[in-house]
């Protein structure tokens, strides 16, 4: 059984610790707020000889992901971390990493995108990359960020998957706040993640292969995309089984969604990331007043757990989806679009409303979440739902 | 070749090696690219002094040499760029318009 140690640590600090414990062969990274302390602390581990790793200091995130792709194709276990503009600068490489089926694991410290310049939390960065073919996990807490990082390695490297995995944590809220985190001993983590046995490694000179090939007009590009779809669908079962195994080791539950109060809830809020804690706090107060409210937290964003979402929200009188990013011109935020689509096949229609909140780190006060639950109670009682999406807490004209 | 791609046009997504990896080295030899050519090099054996400059400069390694002498062009892969004709010090190479008459060229 593993040895557990409880720390007071930031999310970034335990992500760096998890990376050290997963023993990557290569880390290529560029610092960017609020991710910087991940690569800083990991670089310190390398400098102090606490891990054997080729640490590549590159000149940009574009180069960071390029170096990761090269190293992964060569056959190395590769990890990195980024945020915001850094993730945006990696844009073309994100697709190359997934298209080349390279099991790179990357932490993303969710931060707003410019302009205006803003260094604080929202999910615009990762939501912009949502179609890049990466398996994507979200952490609510530093603990989940630690756990997700370790599970990511096993999910990425599973022969039925072989896809890059992004492990997201909320900028500053989770990356920089000191939290209570339970970590396990090195040996247990090394045993859990195991050794990486690459397929088609470029450095396997006995079996020479070519990576990154052309598949143009008349070629099987279409077939390779179907392979990618199959791989990410395969990851559903792999995520569940890796999660179960990790739960047994850590003693902490894991599922693709986490539900609170959903056994008899009449209305619910669907949320991703750190705000789930705020939502549960408000829900707990409302429960004390006898209100039947629930919270659904999405922990795996890609592949999207539509069946689990539909099962959790079936029969509800009203649902609110909280989006911490915009999809300008769409009917709602990215999470809203997924959730409402997941509910479409239900025989009975569930009213769903969308709130955009917390962009650029704007404060997610408990009163705002309370307002959402009040709206839901009104809709459940027959009031009209707000027309279109609501900017939760935005200053209104008098 | 080790990797049999003769039925590739019939393959489904399950038959392709994942990630468009090519599991055999040096197989570009089997990819006939000469059809991209609009002009073909023709060498005069009489004029040629066998200086081998064309062999050095050809970007497609399509000047074929045997016993240190230019013998032919590999028309399965020559792109007709005309560099060989440009550099030849004695104008031994002519570029002549190409028809689409080569067997096996796609
Ligand atoms: S035409 Fe170009 S490709 Fe063809 S043999 Fe001459 S140099 Fe080589
Ligand atoms: S460059 Fe001209 S002279 Fe020299 S080997 Fe080629 S064809 Fe002959």
Image (cartoon, rainbow, N blue to C red):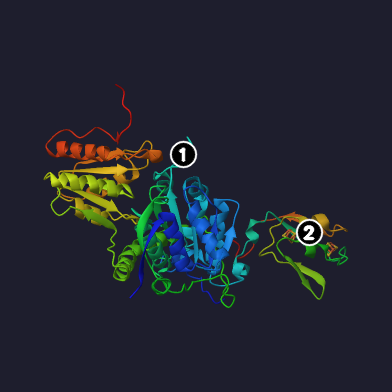
The lab-note entry on whether marks 1 and 2 share a chain reads no
The quarter of the displayed image where residue A111 is located: top left
Mark 1: C-beta under 8 Å from nearest atom of ligand 1: no
Q: Nearer the viewer, residue A281 or A178?
A: A178
Q: Residues within 10 Å of mark 1 (few under 14, many from 20)?
A: some
Q: Which residue is mark 1?
A: A118
Q: Is residue A356 left or right of residue A310?
A: right
Q: Residue furthest top?
A: A398
Q: Residues within 10 Å of mark 2 (few under 14, many from 20)?
A: many
Q: Nearer the viewer, residue B42 or A139?
A: A139
Q: Is residue B76 left or right of residue A331?
A: right
Q: Nearer the viewer, residue B45 or A363?
A: A363
Q: Is residue B105 left or right of residue A235?
A: right
Image quarter (top left, top right, bottom left or bottom right) of the C terminus of chain B: bottom right
Residue at 54 percent of width and 77 percent of height: B2
Badge 1: chain ID: A
Q: Secondary structure at mark 2?
A: helix
| Residue A210 in the image, given as x and y percentages of width and height | 57, 67
Say above or below: A156 vs A369: below
Mark 2: C-beta under 8 Å from nearest atom of ligand 1: yes
| Residue A116 in the image, given as x and y percentages of width and height | 47, 34
Q: Is residue A350 left or right of residue B21?
A: left
- Res. B16 visible in picture: no
The quarter of the displayed image where residue A214 is located: bottom right
Question: Where residue B84 is drawn, which disc sits there?
Answer: 2
């Amino acid at each position: 059984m593993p040895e557990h140690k409880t720390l007071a640590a930031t999310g970034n600090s335990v992500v760096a610790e998890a990376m050290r414990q997963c023993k990557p062969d290569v880390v290529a990274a560029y610092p960017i707020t609020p991710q910087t302390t991940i690569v800083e602390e990991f670089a310190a581990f390398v400098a102090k000889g606490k891990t054997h790793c080729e640490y590549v200091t590159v000149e940009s995130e574009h180069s960071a992901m390029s170096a990761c792709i090269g190293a992964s194709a060569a056959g190395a276990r590769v990890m990195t971390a980024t945020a915001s503009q850094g993730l945006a600068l990696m844009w073309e490489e994100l697709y190359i990493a997934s298209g080349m089926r390279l099991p790179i694991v990357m932490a993303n410290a969710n931060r707003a995108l410019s302009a205006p310049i803003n260094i604080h939390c929202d999910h615009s960065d990762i939501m912009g990359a949502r179609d890049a073919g990466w398996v994507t996990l979200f952490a609510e807490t530093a603990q989940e960020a630690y756990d997700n990082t370790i599970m990511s390695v096993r999910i990425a490297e599973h022969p039925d998957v072989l896809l890059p995995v992004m492990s997201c944590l909320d900028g500053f809220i989770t990356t920089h706040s000191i939290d209570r985190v339970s970590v396990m001993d090195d040996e247990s983590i090394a045993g859990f993640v195991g050794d990486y046995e690459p397929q088609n490694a470029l450095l396997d000179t006995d079996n020479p292969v070519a990576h990154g090939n052309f598949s143009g007009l008349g070629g099987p590009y279409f077939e390779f995309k179907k392979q990618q779809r199959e791989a990410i669908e395969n990851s559903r079962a792999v995520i569940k089984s890796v999660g179960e195994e990790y739960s047994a080791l850590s003693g902490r539950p894991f599922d693709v969604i986490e539900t609170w109060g959903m056994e008899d809830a009449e209305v619910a809020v669907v949320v991703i990331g750190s705000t789930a804690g705020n939502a549960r706090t408000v829900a707990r107060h409302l429960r004390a007043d006898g209100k039947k409210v629930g919270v659904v937290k999405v922990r795996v964003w890609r592949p999207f757990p539509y069946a689990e979402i539909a099962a959790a929200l079936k029969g509800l009188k009203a649902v609110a989806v909280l989006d911490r990013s915009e999809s300008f011109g769409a009917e709602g935020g990215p999470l809203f679009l997924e959730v409402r689509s997941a509910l479409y096949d239900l025989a009975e229609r569930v009213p769903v409303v969308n709130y955009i909140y917390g962009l650029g780190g704007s404060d997610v006060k408990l009163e705002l979440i309370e307002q959402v639950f009040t709206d839901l109670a009104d809709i459940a009682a027959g009031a009209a739902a707000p027309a279109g999406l609501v900017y939760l807490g935005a200053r209104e004209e008098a | 070749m080790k990797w049999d791609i003769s039925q590739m046009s019939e393959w489904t997504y399950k038959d392709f090696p994942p990630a468009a990896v090519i599991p055999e080295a040096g197989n570009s030899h089997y990819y006939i690219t000469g059809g991209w050519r609009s002009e073909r090099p023709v060498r005069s054996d009489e004029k040629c002094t066998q200086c081998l400059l064309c062999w050095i400069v050809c970007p497609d390694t399509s000047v074929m040499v045997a016993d240190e002498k230019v013998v032919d062009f590999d028309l399965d892969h020559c792109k007709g760029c005309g560099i060989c004709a440009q550099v030849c010090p004695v104008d031994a190479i002519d570029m002549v318009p190409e028809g689409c008459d080569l067997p096996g060229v796609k």
